[in-house]
Amino acid sequence: MGKILIINGSPRAPKSNSKQYAALFSKACSWESHYRDLTRANHLELCQAADEVSDVLFVFPLYADGIPVTLLNFLKTWEEYGSRQKPTVSVLINCGFLEAEQNNVAVKMMELYCRENGLPFGSVLKIGGGEAILSTPFRILVQAKIKKLARAIVRQENRTFQVTMPLSKKMFLNASTSYWIRYGERHGITREQMASMQIEP
Amino acid sequence: MTLIVSDRHLEVPEIQRAAIEFIDLSKLKIANCVGCFGCWTKTPGKCVIRDDAVQVYPRIAASDRLMYVSRVRYGSYDTIMKTMLERAIPVQQAFIRLHHGETHHFQRDVAPKEAIIVGYGDLSAEEQDIFRQLIARNANNMNFTQYRVVFAQEQDLEQTVRNEVLTWERS
Ligand SMILES: Cc1cc2nc3c(=O)[nH]c(=O)nc-3n(C[C@H](O)[C@H](O)[C@H](O)COP(=O)(O)O)c2cc1C
């Protein structure tokens, strides 16, 4: 039986969507798993922990069309450290936009990283609409795909899954607009203020 | 406004001669984005982290000719440039629109750009290909109307940038 280290590469790991995706994964996975937030201070500790497992699952958001710099920094440290165990690396990525395919480039970067570092590549789940999907009824679709990801990892398969909100683009635009208006209202900011055209006013 | 943002010092006399603004990110103090969405929902258009990045993203927004010069790692911008680009999201609104058939954010007052992206380092064909795909995605989110991706070995970087600056001067 394998053992999985789940690393949350979100810059806001303790309050992130990735944390929730990771929790769903732990619940769905029959293997023993250990969850860790990535911080600036624990790179070395995580490199060592990755030498004690068969698999590493990176859970992270898409940032500026790529891997968040928090995680890039860790990848560079891990490369320098030189993994001894060479665990299989899998990816659970989420992005804010509706199209889960917008995550493709970041996944390719992770695959390239693994190849350059002699790390076997496992399976992938790409989530679209990932900022809000867990607070919608479509949460169950995510849970189902996370189960598939967990099964693929345990079976040591190379699978790629994706999931998003099954909405037309127009409906997604409306839903996301309401989501962000409510977000602003919690800080006493109106829709008009949020739509300001000024930068550093 | 014509702008070059680089992740390292560059000795390119043409930059001084031409009306080009040059930002060397390696000399600035820029923390990483913490994903708080304050720039969209608390102080729209302004990052809550008041370090050097707040001088840079207004210049990126104002530029209509823009060059990014960055080392490439794993097909991505290396961390110096990537840190800055993540800190540049105050130039967008939270609100989402359809753009080229995909969902993308509305931009604030961001000038449409002709961009040249210079990626440097010892890069395999595959790494170059991934970097090109990244820039194609960036183009949709960063208001590039046209862009070109150019690769250089580090030792040839200054010459490459010089050549690109000359193409600007000629156009
Ligand atoms: C700096 C920054 C850049 C982002 N870039 C993108 C992007 O390029 N494409 C996208 O679909 N979502 C982007 N997002 C949205 C996040 O991927 C999305 O909100 C995600 O759910 C955050 O996950 P987390 O809570 O696990 O960090 C960005 C968010 C931030 C803060």
Image (cartoon, grey):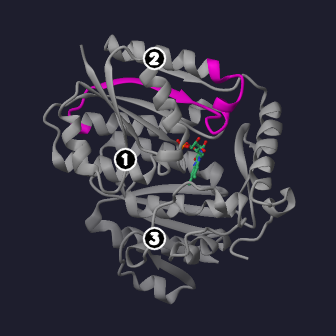
Task: Give the residue type that dot 2 points to.
Answer: Ala
Task: Give the residue type that dot 3 points to.
Answer: Ile
Q: Residues within 10 Å of mark 3 (few under 14, many from 20)?
A: some
Q: Quadrant of the N terminus of chain A?
A: top left
- Distance CA(mark 2)–CA(mark 3): 39 Å
Comparing labels 1 and 3, the label whose residue is closer to the camera: 1
Q: Can you identify the residue that label 1 sits on?
A: A38
Is residue A201 shown left or right of residue A40?
right
Residue at 31% across, 14% down: A156
Q: Quadrant of the C terminus of chain A?
A: bottom right
**Image mark 2: chain:** A
Q: Is mark 2 within 8 Å of ligand 1?
A: no
Residue A194 shows in this picture: yes
Residue A77 in the image: state x and y as whole percent: 25, 51
The residue range painted magenta reads: A116-140
Residue at 47% across, 69% down: B164
Q: Residues within 10 Å of mark 2 (few under 14, many from 20)?
A: some
Does the magenta segment cover residue B5?
no
In this view, the residue in front, B27 or A191, is: A191
Q: Is mark 1 within 8 Å of ligand 1?
A: no
Label 1, secondary structure: give it. loop
Residue A159 shows in this picture: no
- Compared with residue B135, is residue B170 higher up or lower down, i.e. above or below? below
Q: Outermost residue toward the bottom?
A: B17
**Image mark 3: chain:** B
- Compared with residue A51, is residue B45 higher up or lower down, i.e. above or below? below
Q: Can you identify the residue that label 2 sits on?
A: A28
Task: Give the residue type that dot 1 points to.
Answer: Leu
Q: Can you identify the residue that label 3 sits on?
A: B30
